[in-house]
Image (cartoon, rainbow, N blue to C red):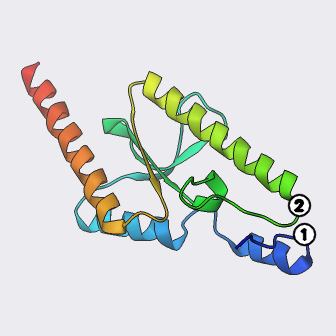
Amino acid sequence: MPLDLQATEAVRRRMQRTSRKDNPFERSIRSQLHARGLRYRIHYPIPGMKRTTCDFAFPGLKIAVFLDGCFWHGCEVHPPSVKKNTEFWLAKIERNRARDVRATAHLTELGWTVLRFWEHEQTDAIVTRIASVVETRRDRHLTALRAR
């Protein structure tokens, strides 16, 4: 069913209450990673990209994590559907998607591992995947340091 996003005062207030940062999905993932002993930096600025951050990062290991909301990032499983102000919202979402592609490409060029997850994915699976990548990268990093 399409969302009714008419620019009314009620809609404006609802959109303002929606957290860009530190929403329950992000906090849940970070909390579980922290419980596993993994430490990270939140809202980490992407090197060389102004005003662009990843949701959190493991900078020493060059791992960036993005937790994308289905509506805001144009999920193909749950495509955004709007009834009002359609051009505005679809253009906004397309700009977000283009920025996501640029950020991923830029970080990859700098040698970072980029992990992207959708809000509809299972939290446990996301945490397991992130932890696995961090542990693998950490082991390689330590092995390289010992070889010096």
Quadrant position of residue 46: top right
Q: CA separation, marks 1 and 2?
A: 8 Å
Which residue matches tag 1?
A: 7
Viewer-proximal residue, 11 or 43? 11
Question: What's the mark number on residue 32?
Answer: none
Are the residues flagged by discs 1 and 2 in contact, CB closer than 8 Å? yes
Q: Is residue 104 left or right of residue 122?
A: right
Reading the chain from its start, which is encountered first: label 1 or label 2?
A: 1
In the picture as drawn, the residue positioned furthest to the front comes out as 1
Vertical placement of residue 110 versus 31, above or below: above
Which quarter shows the N terminus?
bottom right
- Which three-letter amino acid code belongs to the residue tagged 1? Ala
Picture residue at 82% right of the left edge, 70% below the top: 5
**Which residue matches tag 2?**
85
- Give whichever of 17, 84 is nearer the camera: 84
Q: Amino acid at mark 2?
A: Asn
